[in-house]
Image: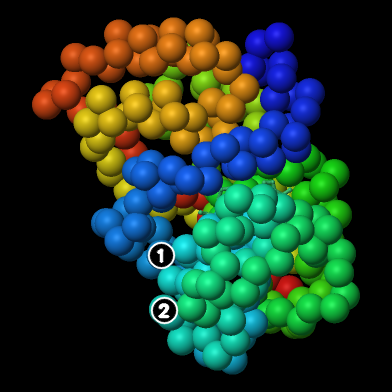
């Protein structure tokens, strides 16, 4: 079975196994490095769209290791701890005990259906590609029902067309899982939200060797279902396609797609 078929057939299981196995080295990948220029940029972009005031209650749905929950708690001077919700025990283990963070083990749609938590702001950062269309629709409708007027859901995701120096089969897996921005926006409008979309861009240069190591380590779930042989061939393809780059680096424009949904 190819990686593409595998992901299409059993996304939830593949993803949950993926995060159990990558949790230990999650923050060694460029995109999750702590304290660097990319994280600082991502935090500024995200907090500008969340518009959280100190009295607001924030939920980070699919919050993983709680790093952004901790950073947002401090940056927005929130009085209440940020609730970091994630189905992965291994990811949440790293979130437990962080200042300004409390954790709950649950998937996003299950949490959204609960009536026992009140909140004003919800962040979904880098998780919507893990949810099927029906799950997303139900989740956004439930979040709309639970938020007060003026409440916001900020979905931070990536474009359907990958700007990354992937091998071809990885780009196919990416496209199969990454919804178009317009699809996500329409789902949230149907749930009753007023929706605004924009894309923020950050130019990236990474040493080719580091990029190849990140891919070999399956740093994104895009790579989760390739066999070791397929992955090794993919890394060779990256070397062939991008190996002539200046200074031994790969360069690309990182694009974060933001969908800000407001309850009137
Ligand atoms: C790429 S990580 C992003 C984590 C965090 N938001 C961040 O930006 O670092 C994706 C996260 O989504 C979580 N996830 C996967 N399926 C999910 C679901 N159905 N509901 C909520 N979170 C999910 C994974 O466990 C993982 O922690």
Give the mark nearest the N terminus, 2 or 1: 1
Q: Residue at x 28, y 31 (%)?
A: 210
In the rendered image, residue 107, in percent from the top left (x then y), is placed at: 76, 54
Q: CA distance from mark 2 to mark 1?
A: 9 Å
Q: Nearer the viewer, residue 225 or 76?
A: 225
Q: Which residue is mark 2?
A: 75
Q: Along the horizontal axis of the image, is 68 left or right of 242?
A: right
Above or below for 8 versus 73: above
- Check disc 2: other Cα within 10 Å, few if <14, some if 14-19, many if 20+: some
Q: Which residue is mark 1?
A: 43
Q: Quadrant of the C terminus?
A: bottom right
Above or below for 172 versus 114: above
Q: Quadrant of the N terminus?
A: top right
* Disc 2 and disc 1 in contact, CB within 8 angstroms: yes
Q: Nearer the viewer, residue 180 or 1?
A: 1
In the rendered image, residue 100, in percent from the top left (x then y), is placed at: 52, 79
Above or below for 207 versus 116: above
């Amino acid at each position: 079975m190819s990686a593409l078929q595998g992901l299409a057939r059993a996304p939830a299981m593949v993803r949950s196994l993926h995060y159990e196995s990558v949790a230990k080295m999650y923050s060694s990948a460029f995109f999750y490095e702590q304290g660097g220029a990319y994280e600082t940029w991502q935090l500024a972009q995200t907090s500008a769209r969340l518009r959280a005031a100190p009295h607001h209650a924030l939920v980070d749905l699919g919050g993983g290791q709680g790093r952004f929950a901790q950073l947002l708690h401090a940056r927005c001077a929130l009085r209440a701890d940020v609730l970091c919700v994630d189905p992965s025990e291994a990811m949440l283990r790293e979130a437990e005990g962080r200042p300004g963070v409390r954790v709950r083990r649950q998937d996003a749609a299950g949490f959204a259906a609960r009536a026992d938590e009140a909140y004003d702001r919800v962040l979904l950062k880098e998780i919507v590609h893990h949810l099927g269309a029906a799950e997303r629709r139900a989740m956004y409708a439930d979040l709309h029902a639970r938020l007060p007027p003026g409440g916001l859901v900020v979905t931070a995701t990536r474009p359907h067309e990958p700007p990354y120096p992937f091998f071809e089969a990885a780009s196919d897996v990416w496209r199969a899982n990454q919804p178009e921005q317009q699809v996500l926006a329409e789902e949230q409008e149907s749930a009753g939200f007023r929706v605004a979309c924009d894309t923020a861009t950050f130019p990236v240069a990474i040493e080719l060797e580091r990029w190849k190591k990140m891919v070999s380590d399956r740093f994104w779930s895009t790579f989760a279902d390739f066999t070791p042989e397929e992955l090794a061939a993919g890394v060779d393809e990256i070397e062939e396609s991008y190996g002539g780059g200046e200074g031994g680096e790969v360069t690309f424009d990182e694009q974060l797609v933001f969908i800000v949904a407001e309850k009137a």
